[in-house]
């Protein structure tokens, strides 16, 4: 769905929408809403956004962290007010958001794009202090750089451990791309080292493609331990870099713990998260099923078959903005058809992808049969290299569209 080129006629006074969260979902929604003739305030505590896509390449030493950071000047040029604050609370019936400095923003509708919070309490022994030793790097930024530096400092011959949670979590194939690129780093820089992936599930996104690539590129370097093989981590011993599972203990020189996740904290404060920690939505308008007048997009939303990815967040934001504009006019929002494509790098010149098309069905976003698929098995290395270049082009395109 492209950005609308012209604003529709909106009823009488110019409506106001507050958007909370300045990532791929929130920034996209803010820009589309502004171009639809709506007064928009974007609430975002950070001066810049650190993108998670391609951050695994930063960990592997293939790009700098500065390539992941994007500012909000383009949104300001669109007439969007940037409130550099944390959203502390939401008054749904009163249609307002209270910010960290105590100021209150009134609105006609609210769009929440809070991303994820890490459930540090879900893994005994893992907290903020432990994360400083055993980084998660699942929010791009300081943790990304920390994990990279730990890999650089590790002696050749050291063991790297990864802990991967059960579904759902941000970017389903992300841990396996990370494992691939860490393996690339070890193969080229520390060839006597190995990587052990402790996984809380048996099946994962693009599994056959990843495992075929690992056998081709990194034979004997990656050991994947699935749930059925005792891969679920049940406790963390940060001081010794030990991950405890039901069947054993694993110690690593570098340990990457990716914990379970939930919607960002403001979702619970706003009353839009259910007992799963995620936010049920109407699949046509993205309006919360628990709080009228509040819409939830991106990783925080329960989007049915649609995965939690940057591409999905961008697509949802566009559809949500159109729906919000329609609702403000007093008309029914159109049923969206949404696309998601997710690229993964297995090596700098080896890419794979999965794509899907989604539409509202049965109260959720359902995948359209036969409209998606994955990269072909057994493709040539030229084809894999072409997909790697497509991944780079996609990242440049989406960040330019959203932040440029």
Image (tube, grey):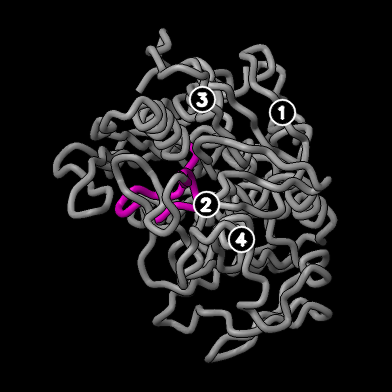
Looking at the image, is mark 2 or mark 1 nearer the viewer?
Answer: 2
Q: Height in image: 75 above or below 195? A: above
- Real-space Cα separation, disc 3 to disc 2, in angstroms: 17 Å
Q: Residue furthest top?
A: 6
Do labels 3 and 4 touch, CB within 8 Å?
no
Name the residue at the left extreme. Answer: 370
167 in magenta: no
Q: Earlier in the sequence, mark 2 or mark 1?
A: 1
**Distance from label 3 to label 4 (Cα)?**
24 Å
Disc 1 designates what residue? 82
Q: Where's residue 173, x and y in %?
A: 45, 52
Q: Are marks 4 and 2 in contact (CB under 8 Å)?
A: no
Distance from the alpha carbon under mark 4 to that under mark 2: 14 Å
- Label number found at residue 15: 3
Left or right: 318 in relation to 348: left
Crowding at mark 4 (Cα within 10 Å: few <14, some 14-19, many 20+): some
Query: Which quadrant of the figure contains the N terminus?
Result: top left
Q: Give the residue at mark 4.
A: 269
Instruction: Report the residue at 33% width, 33% height from top.
Output: 380
Observer-nearest of 283 and 245: 283
Query: Residue 148 appears at what percent x and percent y?
Result: 76, 50
Nearer to us in this view, 169 or 64: 169
Numbered label tally = 4
Bounds of the magenta span?
294-310
The reply to whether the magenta stretch includes residue 305 is yes
Q: CA distance from mark 3 to mark 1?
A: 17 Å
- Residue positioned most to the front: 12
């Amino acid at each position: 769905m492209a950005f609308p080129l012209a604003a529709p006629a909106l009823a009488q006074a110019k409506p106001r929408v507050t958007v909370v969260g300045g990532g791929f979902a929130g920034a996209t929604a803010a820009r589309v809403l502004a171009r639809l003739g709506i007064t928009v305030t974007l609430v975002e505590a950070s001066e810049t956004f650190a993108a998670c896509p391609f951050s695994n390449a930063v960990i592997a030493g293939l790009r700098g962290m500065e390539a992941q950071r994007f500012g909000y000047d383009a949104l300001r040029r669109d007439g969007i007010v940037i409130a550099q604050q944390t959203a502390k609370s939401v008054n749904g019936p009163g249609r307002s958001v209270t910010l960290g400095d105590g100021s209150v923003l009134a609105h006609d509708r609210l769009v929440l794009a809070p991303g994820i919070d890490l459930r540090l309490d879900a893994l005994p022994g893992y907290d903020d202090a432990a994360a400083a030793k055993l980084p998660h790097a699942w929010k791009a930024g300081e943790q990304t750089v920390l994990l990279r530096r730990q890999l650089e400092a590790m002696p050749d011959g050291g063991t790297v451990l990864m802990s991967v949670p059960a579904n759902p979590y941000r970017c389903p194939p992300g841990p396996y791309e990370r494992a691939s690129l860490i393996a690339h780093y070890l193969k080229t820089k520390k060839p006597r080292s190995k990587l052990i992936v402790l996984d809380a599930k048996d099946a994962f996104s693009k599994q056959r493609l990843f495992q075929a690539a690992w056998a081709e590129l990194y034979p004997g370097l990656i050991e994947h331990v699935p749930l059925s093989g005792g891969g679920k981590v049940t406790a963390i011993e940060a001081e010794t870099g030990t991950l405890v599972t039901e069947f054993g203990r694993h110690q690593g020189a570098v340990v990457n713990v990716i914990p379970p996740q939930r919607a960002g904290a403001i979702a619970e404060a706003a009353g839009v998260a259910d007992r799963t920690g995620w936010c049920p939505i109407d699949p046509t308008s993205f309006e919360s099923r628990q709080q009228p007048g509040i819409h939830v997009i991106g990783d925080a939303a329960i989007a049915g078959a649609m995965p939690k990815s940057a591409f999905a967040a961008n697509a949802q934001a566009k559809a949500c903005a159109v729906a919000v504009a329609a609702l403000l006019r007093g008309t029914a929002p159109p049923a969206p058809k949404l696309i998601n494509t997710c690229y993964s790098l297995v090596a700098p010149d080896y890419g794979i992808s999965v794509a899907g098309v989604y539409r509202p069905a049965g109260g959720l976003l359902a995948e359209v049969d036969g409209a998606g698929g994955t990269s072909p098995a057994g493709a040539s290395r030229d084809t894999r290299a072409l997909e790697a270049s497509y991944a780079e082009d996609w990242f440049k395109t989406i960040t330019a569209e959203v932040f440029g």
